[in-house]
Amino acid sequence: MGAAVARRFGREGFAVALLSRSGAGDLAGELTAEGITARGFAADVRDRTRLASALADAAAALGPIEVLQYSPIPAREFLRPLLETTHDDLAAAVEFSLHGPVAAVQQVLPGMRDLGRGTVVLVNGGSAARPNPAVAGTSVAFAAESAYARMLHEVVGPDGVYVGQLIVPRAIREDDPVTNGPAIAEHVWSLHRSREGFRHFHTPLPDA
C-alpha cells in the first residue's frame, strides 16, 4: 500500500520520502527509474527521536512536507486476544499507534502551517472503529490514535491542514480489486483532494 501511495502521489508531481526501518532504498530506486523523485530514510516509528529526525532530513532533501501518510503494519503482539494481551503489549501498541503519529505530526505541522496547506492521512484497520477482543492491542491503540486525530482535524483545519482517517476493514490483498494497494492509494489521493470529513471507510465495516 505504501508503495502504491508513493506512486499515486508521485504521478501528480510530488517528491516522495519513504520511511522504513530499512531505509526503503530499493523502492526509492524503483520509483526514481519510473521518473518519480524519491528518497528513502531510515526510521522506526517506536523511536520518536529518530522518526522526527528522518522527517526533518526528508524536508531538508526534498522540500517542506505537504502530505503525511501514517500506516505502519502492527506487530504481532498487538494482535493477540484480550486475555492474552499483557500490559507491555498495550504499552508497545500505544507507543506504535499514538506516540509515533504524534511525533510525526509535531515534526511536519509547522511546515504545513507555514505553507498554509497540508494533509495528514492515518490508515487503520477495522478495530479502530469497532474494538475487537481478538486483536486487543490495536483496538486500544487505534482508539487513542483516532481520538488524537479527530481532535487534530478540528484544531488545525482553520490553518489549511486537513486531517483524515481511512479505515480499511478487510485485508489488503493484491489479488482483490477493491482492497489492493493501488485502490487504497486512489482513496488516499481522493481524501487529499476533497478534504471532506474525518473518518472514511474504504469498504463497509462488516456486521458484528
Image (cartoon, rainbow, N blue to C red):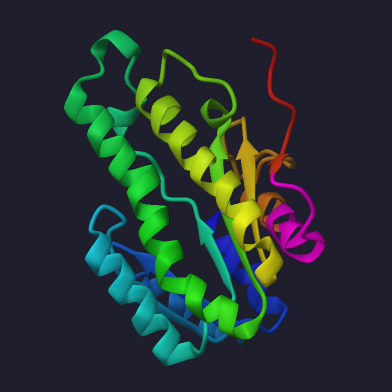
Query: Do we see residue 68 in this rendering?
Result: yes
Which of 163 and 121 lies nearest the eye of the viewer? Answer: 163
Which of 111 and 72 lies nearest the eye of the viewer? Answer: 111
Q: Residue at x 61, y 30 (%)?
A: 170
Left or right for 193, reference 115 = right
Above or below for 51 versus 201: below
The image shows residue 88 at horizontal and vertical percentages of: 17, 29
Let me know if residue 100 is in the magenta part. no
Q: How many marks?
A: 0
Left or right for 11, reference 58 = right
Above or below for 152 versus 199: below
Left or right for 100, reference 18 = left
Magenta segment, which residues?
186-198
The quadrant holding residue 74 is: top left
Left or right for 51, reference 128 = left
Let me know if residue 194 is in the magenta part. yes
Query: Do we see residue 25 in this rendering?
Result: no
Q: Residue at x 40, y 21 (%)?
A: 135
Q: Residue at x 36, y 80 (%)?
A: 56
Give the quadrant of the C terminus: top right
Above or below for 136 versus 143: above
Above or below for 198 versus 76: below
Which of 205 and 117 lies nearest the eye of the viewer? Answer: 117
Prevailing secondary structure class for the magenta stretch in the rendered image: helix
The quadrant holding residue 118 is: bottom right
The image shows residue 71 at horizontal and vertical percentages of: 48, 51
Q: Residue at x 41, y 44 (%)?
A: 73
The image shows residue 14 at horizontal and vertical percentages of: 63, 81
The image shows residue 5 at horizontal and vertical percentages of: 61, 63
